[in-house]
Image: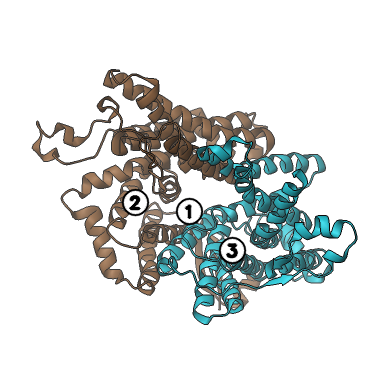
Amino acid sequence: MRLKIEPRLEIPRWLPVVSIILALILALIIGAIPLAYGGLDPFEAYYQMFRTGFFEPYSFSDTLVKATPLILAGLGVTIAFRMRLWNIGAEGQLFLGAWAATGVALFWLPPTTPKVVMLAAMTLGGFAAGALWGAIPGVLKAKLGVNEIISSLMLTYVAVEFNNYFVYGPWAAGGFGLTAPYPRTAWFPRLTDFGDTIPAFRGMTAHLGILYGIIAAVILFVIFKYSKWGYELKVIGDNPNAARYAGMNLSRTIILTMIISGGLAGLAGMSEVAGVVHRLQENFSPGYGFTAIIVAWLARLNPLAVIVVGYLFGGLLVGGDAIQPAGIPLLIQGIILFCVISADTFTRYRIRLVQPAATTAQS
Amino acid sequence: MELAFLINIIGAGLRTGTPLLFATLGELITERAGVLNLGVEGMMLVGALTGFAVAHSTGNPWIGVLAAMLAGGAISLLHAFVSITLRGDQVVSGLALTFVGAGLTSVLGASYVQVRDVPRLPVLPLPFLYDIPLIGPSILWPLFGEKQNVIFFIGLLLVPAVWFWIERTRPGLQLRAIGEKPAAADAVGVNVGALRYFYVFVGGLFAGLAGASLSLAVTPLWIDEMTAGQGWIAVGLVIFAGWNPWRALMGAYIFGALRRLPLDLQAIAWLPFASNPILGVWLNMIPYLFTILALVFSSREAIRKRLGAPAALGIPYVRGERGA
């Protein structure tokens, strides 16, 4: 008897969804082993995580808050991965977006600027800075053939140092790695701001950023499905040579894709500082840009699915804050990613146990 | 003074570049077999923690090194299973390995963060150098130091060993074959899948050694994410090295020196960094920016000389499928 892996001729529609759910369950089971080894009761830890992430009175709003940067950055990763452009530097692009938004809010516009103008300028600044940071690996890849995996990740370390320079240097307030708080005009509206008219919203911190995420997802969905650019992305990703013969401009598409990918990650950073932190600080992101990679992959690079998966992972982060040590969410994310890639195999291929004689006869 | 400074920098490179050398050699071997493993950072972390913990509990750093290598090898098999058996995406699987390594070591290493009294790997005296006339006492002696950690010598021995294995032995020929033309290797009876498993494992052993040499020699302690991107730099160095072990040696020492450079530059009185420590943050970017520069340089060279990655790098091998 041996394992035989053969491609499926057609994939039933339910199979990918079922396989991902099974992969998630499997990941939680596997994750229980290191948790137990690390001295935790896995059932208790999972119970705490799910309860805090999804079933407390404020869970929905709290989880939306964490889901917002994951969705925006996850959409950025989605575009790049669609054309097999491995932008794994979303974290750095996110830092740059937050940096530019802070520059606008605190230094480049007066605090008396009307709120709408202020937020619009921060949005543009955040997108532009993230886009610029994403464009660097894009140009290097398109013009010089530099591996974008390494360059985008190296730029993440550079972005973190860049951020450190400003929060400890010229923008520091007090020298603890933070800037002064933004004026109220630079705060995203939150649900709790409407607490006077709708009492149910009191204390809820979900903010405008989630709408950015949903709108961006819908726009991308339409682009992927109906536009020429969306089609080009897919063709270039599947077969770059065919795309070149068909007259597509590869290097322009690579650069444009990295600009939009980085810009969305920049928006994630901008929305985090405008909606949650209200200042720039060291380490304001617990690795949103990296988790976004998993979100994008788990959503099978479908922008609408990114919203759902982003919400699930937001819950995982909210729940993860409730348990120690801090590395647990990262570990579980890694295991989930492994299980999902494995599950992909079971959807693309049929795996059977066959007699050795049958194998030789076929091959 | 300038010569002393330069000697100081290069000497630092020899000391701190060795873990990077191990990681680069391991990834180089794995990639020559046709498998891209981006999980070096995670495997190094697993090696660093395992080496530290085992050395701490047994009191013997060598047992720690051995355990670190086996742990690095063991966790690399996750990637081997997903990318070879299941034919999953190698980029994403490698990323997953990095997440798992970082998360796992953060969870299991929490109790070791405060530990300081770990037995270290020994330092050995450098023979003969001082006796070489003229340059011996003035250049070589300060450059290599009176003594070097044992990992430095292991690194120097491993480079020719790896080169000889890949380029001059029969198993090395099979290694290159499964990385360049797996279908041809398969046709002459080489078990492509099993060999690829083996070389992913070897890459894991090397990454584990790299981690242990960090936590038991270069910076003898354990902290979360102590590799600080060195595993990723190693992946970049493999490209910079053009998949050649000797150039990997050069690259690793250069980057070892670059890691130390921020400290050395901050000590120079007439540079602005000494009086304004905030500016030192810019210096911390040096190793990462140089990695990108090195890639730009090597990509241009690769185009000119038609050098390149192993032809089957990152492509799962399936008998009878096109492109394999």
Q: Which mark is residue A27?
A: none
What residue is rendered at 59% in x and 70% in y? B73
Amino acid found under the numbered disc labelled 3: Leu
Query: Dot 2 lies on which element?
Result: helix
Which chain is in brown here?
A: A
Residue B25 quadrant: bottom right
What residue is rendered at 42% in x and 68% in y? B108
Residue under label 2: A313
Residue A173 quadrant: top left
Q: Which mark is residue A10?
A: 1
Query: Dot 1 lies on which element?
Result: loop
State which chain disc 3 sits on. B
Viewer-closest of A53 and B175? A53
Indicate the position of residue B72 as horizontal and vertical percent values.
Answer: 57, 68
Q: Which mark is residue B214?
A: 3
Residue A26 quadrant: bottom left
Q: Is residue B316 above or below residue A311?
A: below
**Label 2 vs 1, first from the N-terminus:** 1
Q: Badge 2 local density, few (<14 within 10 Å), some, or many (20+)?
A: many
3D distance between C-alphas at marks 2 and 1:
30 Å
Q: Is residue A236 visible in this depiction of the protein?
A: yes
* Image quarter (top left, top right, bottom left or bottom right) of the N terminus of chain B: top right
- Residue lying furthest bottom in this view? B58
Indicate the position of residue A159 as horizontal and vertical percent values.
Answer: 50, 39
Q: Nearer the viewer, mark 3 or mark 1?
A: 3
Q: Is residue B220 above or below residue B232?
A: below
